[in-house]
Amino acid sequence: MTTTRRLGTVFALLVSVLALVGASRLVLPATGGVDGEPPGVRRQLTFLRAALADGAGERAQELFPEGYFFAHALYGLTWVESGLRRPAGERAEALREARWALDRLDSPAGRAPFSPDLTPAYGVFYLGWTNWLRGGMLALQPADRRDPADLRRFAADSAALGAAFAAAPTPYLAAYPGQAWPVDSTVAVASLRLHDTLLPPRFGGTVGRWLDGVRQRLDPTTGLMPHRVDPVTGEPVEVARGTSQSMIHRFLVDVDPDFAREQYLRFRDRFVVSPLRLGPAVREYPVGTSGAGDVDSGPLLLGVSLSATVVTLGAAQARGDDRLARGLANYGELAGLPLDTPWTKRYAFGAMPIGDAFLAWAKTARPWVAAAPADPPAPNVPLLWRLPLVTVLLVVALLPWVPRLARYRPRRADPGPAAAVGLPS
């Protein structure tokens, strides 16, 4: 065999292997639902811990204002989610790693982007997410052995959030001076509901008033919570968008399951699409509208936001929308270019650890306060959506071998001299 033919064979093998691996990623389980251990997430966490120790949070901060915060918060929350899937006696590692993350948020670097002059101090984004993480750490601990310092801080921060909501004329508190996003207040209110499951209840009235205020200020275009609001009145100033909606629905199920179901179905109808009929994805703007991408959404391809698509995986799983969650997870295994080793797993070859943090958090999603939904929504993803992609990949796997098969000609047996002159043998 010549060198050229050898190289051609190696290339054909490589193409076939890659195509078959891609096909397998579309069909093998990529998430474990609300109770199971998602495949690969533990190895993702190993990669993320090393990346954060190497400055991944600081590098993410250069990309967007909450980069450092999200990189650490999502790492800690994924450990909480993983720990909640384990028996009470097997949660020490999850608690230790979640505390490591919280300590880095409860620091000058973690608070740097936020203003201490806001109400509550450092704003609803900072206090809502840290309160949620601290509450998750308490949920990992047996009720009679919870850390007293964590309990005091959780109670105090919850009280600060409750007082801020009670004093505000709007359900949406400011995250930055003069700026308010409903998603941030949704996280904070979910943390108050978590408080009332871990400690003596005190925020039921606060949550009820918040929901009333939200219903009065829905985006008139979609009937959903808006992306951005007037910080004084709470009135919508920007249409609902996929990046914030996907995160809202991760938390709203723990605030009010009935309202969450209604809002989730509206979101799914207006944002979940199948571009080119190749699989589920999430638009940044509602179907029929368009807009520019930004630092939150990333570049928009056919109107689809990669970040909204990743986070919607978690929202769908928390809502019991398993077919959509599995579809998004499998699509991510194909398009995310994961690099697997026996010890770590990273996507996009590890170039953007913040993306790994969002995906690991999405795959471990589950309600913390509400029961798992007993009435999952009817599937809106076709049962055989994978078939076109799998077919294409199988064709790609076979294609390099077609020229070789065409060149192959089996040798015919030599008929011998008798047959050549027409004589009997």
Image (cartoon, rainbow, N blue to C red):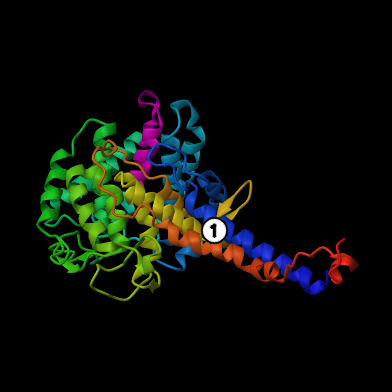
Residue at 24% across, 67% down: 286
Q: Position of residue 70 (x, y in %)?
A: 41, 56
Q: How many numbered marks does the figure carry?
A: 1
**Main secondary structure along the magenta-highlighted residues:** helix
Say above or below: 212 vs 351: above
* Residue extending farthest top: 144
| Relative image position of residue 375 (x, y in whole percent) | 23, 40
Q: Mark 1 highlights which residue?
A: 22
User: Which residue is at the front of the view, 17 or 232?
Assistant: 17
Q: Is residue 4 left or right of residue 393?
A: right
| Residue 299 horizontal side relative to residue 194, left or right | right
> Picture coordinates of residue 271 (x, y %)?
27, 63
Magenta residue span: 130-150
Farthest residue to the front: give it. 423
Asked whether residue 411 is in view, the answer is yes
140, 388: nearer the viewer = 388
Residue at image location 17% in from the left, 63% down from the top? 222
Quarter of the N terminus within the rendering: bottom right
Quadrant housing the C terminus: bottom right
Residue 225 lies in what quarter of the image? bottom left
